[in-house]
Amino acid sequence: MKASTHCLQCSLSGFFNLADQFSMEEKQVKEFFSFLAGLNYDVTPVEIMKDCHAKIKELINNDDPYLEKKKLYNQKILGQYSYFIEEINNSEDPIKKAVTLSIGGNIIDFLPKDNQNIDEKIQNILQRDLAVDDVSSLLEDLRNASSVLYLTDNCGEVVLDKLLIQTLIEHNIVDKEKIVVATRGVPIINDATIVDAEEIGLTTMLKVINNGDNAPGTLLKTTSKEFQDYFNKADVVISKGMGNYETLDEIANKKIYFLFVAKCKYAADLLGVAVDDFICKKSFIQE
């Protein structure tokens, strides 16, 4: 998915939030805008964000500026884990409820809406339906899969990914030995790393790797060989978040299920949905 000028809104939103937080000097602000002018915009939104966030971290001299927020959201959602389990178990369709919760967790994003009321958003998630619903196909493909790769996205959200995986295992949709989870390789915005997976107990539940890269998506060309091997081997890839959709939507000969919230009009228009719609979309492009 190619970037548009609208994609700069996310970059600038994050930049100004951090500029205020770290009391950035005027010369640093000017340096960032000069940096923006020299970027190549004929790429994916993720590649722009990767470059922008690397520059921001350099300017504020901080490799993980969202560290405390990430911990806060992991613990906030983890503290409601039992409540979410009860909601799933009381649902007429527990698996679909778990999928919807996992997708809804994608709202936990520091860009572009940094001042969101998460408690209110979580309550809304429980009442939502899917605008694109390929859940039945996902379950069928998971039952027939020998290997599954699950790509995580944001902190907080990763707790609901754990809950979805637990639900799939408990309902005998897939064996846990067949699932490998992948996080980002190093901190980037609020995306989950293997440290977050350890913090929420995901690493004690099943195998977790990192993708070796610092992009807020999955740029296969810059991921590690280990990750690429798992990706190529997987019969099914579950891809969480818009960043993963933006970077993997044109991958051929691979069953990929994109689970995310359409957070901007540009992406929503491409999908034929409304902003904030919940998406579970199967992609299988044959070459």
Image (tube, helix red, strand yellow):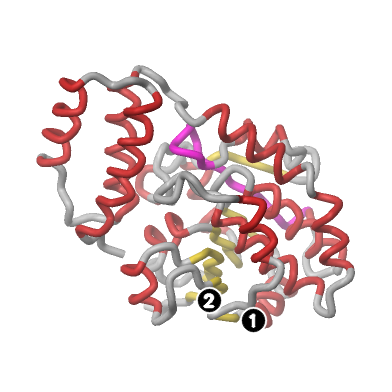
Residue sitting at x 32%, y 31%: 54
Q: Say which residue label 1 marks.
A: 137
Q: Position of residue 193 (x, y in %)?
A: 57, 36
Secondary structure category for the residue under label 1? helix
Q: Amino acid at mark 1?
A: Ser
Sort mark 1 into few (<14), some (14-19) or many (20+) by Cα contacts within 10 Å: some
Q: Is residue 153 visible?
A: no
Q: Whole-Å distance between the Cαs marked 1 and 2?
A: 8 Å
Q: Say which residue label 2 marks.
A: 282
Q: Is residue 142 left or right of residue 70?
A: right
Q: Is residue 113 magenta?
A: no
Q: Is residue 227 visible?
A: yes
Please identify the quarter of the rendering in which residue 207 is found.
Answer: top right
Quadrant containing the N terminus is bottom left
Query: Compared with residue 258, is residue 201 higher up or lower down, i.e. above or below?
Result: above
Q: Is residue 58 left or right of residue 152?
A: left
Q: Position of residue 210 (x, y in %)?
A: 56, 39
Q: Is residue 224 left or right of residue 158?
A: left
Q: Nearer the viewer, residue 73 or 228?
A: 73
Query: Compared with residue 16, is residue 107 higher up or lower down, i.e. above or below?
Result: below
Sort mark 2 into few (<14), some (14-19) or many (20+) by Cα contacts within 10 Å: many
Q: Nearer the viewer, residue 38 or 232?
A: 38
Please identify the quarter of the rendering in which residue 188 is found.
Answer: top left
Q: Amino acid at mark 2?
A: Lys
Residue sitting at x 16%, y 20%: 27
Residue sitting at x 84%, y 79%: 92
Query: Compared with residue 212, is residue 217 higher up or lower down, i.e. above or below?
Result: below
Secondary structure category for the residue under label 2? strand
Q: Nearer the viewer, residue 246 or 142?
A: 246
User: Do the CB atoms of the residues marked 1 and 2 lie less than 8 Å apart?
Assistant: yes
Q: Which residues are magenta?
A: 177-191
Q: Nearer the viewer, residue 119 or 284?
A: 119
